[in-house]
Amino acid sequence: MKSLNETIYIFDVDGTLTEPRKKVTKKFEQQFLKWVKGKRAIIATGSDFVKTKEQLTSPMIESFEMIFCCMGNELRDSSGNIVYKNSYTPPTNLVSDLERLAHKSKYKTKTGNHIEIRTGMINFSTVGRNANHQQRMEYNKWDKIHNERHKLVNLLKKKHSNLTFSVGGSISIDIIPEGKDKGQCIDYILENLNPHKVKFYGDRTGPGGNDYGIVKKLEYSNIPEYSWSQVEGPNQLLTSLLDV
């Protein structure tokens, strides 16, 4: 039987357990599996389960007690079985606005698949989700200078006040119904695990980032002990974990 005093570790995937949209390295996998043995670990990612399986190996996935995908709008167990799944139909005016913004973007490279409808949410990218790793790096570098994604988030918020927009990964924006951000992962954990101590690791834990929902929910929870760490990729994460 699991002890209530055990620490529950929650991890983002993109930019945390792996480099954005890249497969976990063999070295990281070996070290993580050694570290996680005997611990309670949970995934909370904005990606869908298909992409999660592309980035993490089967032994890694099986080491997690719960796998929250699509900002917590889908939950699977360690075997990949669906526990729950939220539904969402995006309004046509939102889709039209996103198509227009992708077309008007000052970033010239367009790779296609700009609007990806996932379980309970939308993922939007002006460069397009078909971008390869090099194109993702190039856009991310450009975005850090021109701040396009944060500007688009602020613009979309004004027109679609019933939705939540956050910067996620290296090229995209996550769009969800209000209250359906990653914070709902904490709600489920509270209801079903009654945790005593929680540690969260993500790469976008500040306001406007798609990990911020977990941070906010932790701050207002009744969990006796909790903390979160902003990490810049798997190497920094591993250093943090080895210090635990």
Image (cartoon, grey):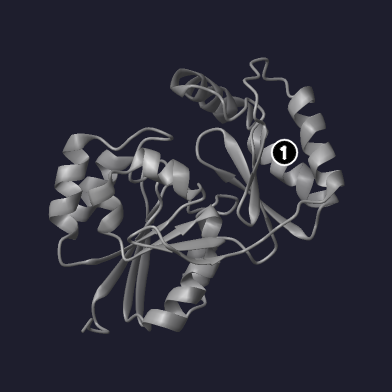
Q: Considering only vertical position in the picture, is 129 above or below 118?
A: above
Q: Residue at x 58, y 30 (%)?
A: 129
Residue 36, above or below 141: below
Q: Which residue is mark 1?
A: 152
Note whether 130 is above or below 25 in the view shown.
Answer: above
Residue shown at 21% from the left, 84% from the top? 1
Residue 153 lies, in percent from the top left, at: 70, 44
Residue depicted at x 59% and y 61%: 181
The quadrant the C terminus occupies is bottom left
Residue 201 point in image, percent of width and height: 36, 55
| Label 1 secondary element | helix
Specify the quadrant of the image occupied by residue 148: top right
Residue drawn at (51%, 75%), measured in percent from left and top?
A: 187
Residue type, label 1: Leu
**Is the residue 25 above or below the residue 32 in the image?**
above
Query: On the rendered structure, is 4 left or right of 50?
Result: left
> Which corner quadrant of the image does residue 89 belong to?
bottom right
Left or right of 159 on screen, residue 212: left
> Can residue 222 be seen here?
no
Q: Report the front residue among 145 and 136.
A: 136
- In the picture provided, is 88 more to the left or to the right than 211? right
